Amino acid sequence: MLLNVQGQEAYCYTGGKPFNRELPTVVFIHGAQNDHSVWILQTRYFAHHGFGVLALDLPGHGRSKGAPLTSVEAMADWLIALLDAAGVQKAALIGHSMGSLIALESAFRAPDRVGRLALVGTAYPMKVSDALLDASKNNEQMAIDMVNIWSHTSIAQKPSCPGPGFYVMNGSQRLMQHVSRQNPAQVFYTDFSACNAYANGEVAAKSLAGPALLVLGKRDMMTPPKATATLTKTIPQCRVVQIDNCGHSLMAEQPDAVLDALFGFMKE
């Protein structure tokens, strides 16, 4: 589905069904150098089981036009404008990695527009190492390689995760390369810089009025579970699910466990 958001064309995947704003809406927000496709295995189930799904491409990512936004705050404003464009008054938000910060900041900026919140592979503060920041600016392929090594629990997921012919690590690498080819504007560096600079997470977490779920990979090296201490101590209604044998690319490495956690939470 194409929408006009802040004067630019924005794309949302709707889970294989036409978007119905009369249903409870769930917005899925991807992370750095990704697009809506990281949520394919979860969004299709939601869309076929009673929810209206908007899995967005952020500006400069995937099919959405425009330059990548330079701050989490700007991305949150964009997301709220997307809800306006879609005619959605209130939605639940599910964000992965950088997307979790966008979800958190959106709930802070528009508390009346956001219901439940699910933060997947999250951390706060979400600091990026100097080595990775430098690579994302000066050697993007090296940054892609670094992130993929650190985001997965093994080179070859077994047995045939999550199905024959599906190579988790290679799929993630190819997606990041695709985003890079589509947009030469140093998307990775812009995204990482935004994560690194975001400083309103604790204030936003304290302000949450509704329930929040943190879905974490026990073997996540990008945003390890211990890096959520500020959020778990600060969010008033917080619960945590940790998934075994899982790194930062939770939605692909353990798709069923992630779906079970998210769907159960959203159905409550």
Image (cartoon, rainbow, N blue to C red):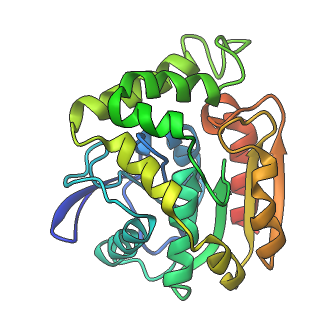
Front residue of 196 and 157: 196
With 117 as the anchor, is 183 left or right in this view? left
For residue 151, side relative to residue 217 (left or right)? left
* Vertical arrangement, residue 236 with respect to residue 29, above or below: below
- Residue 258 visible in the current orientation: yes
User: What percent of the width, then of the height, locates residue 91?
Assistant: 52, 73
Extreme bottom residue here?
112
Which residue is more in the foreground, 191 or 115? 191
Which of the 4 image quarters holds residue 33?
Answer: top left
Q: x%, y% of residue 80?
A: 39, 75
Give the vertical position of 146 relative to 111 (above or below): above
Quarter occupied by the C terminus: bottom right
Q: Residue at x 33, y 78 (%)?
A: 84
Residue at 57%, 21% in the rendered image: 168
**Which residue is rendered at x = 39% and y = 61% of the image?**
19
- The residue that appears at 58% across and 69% down in the rendered structure is 104
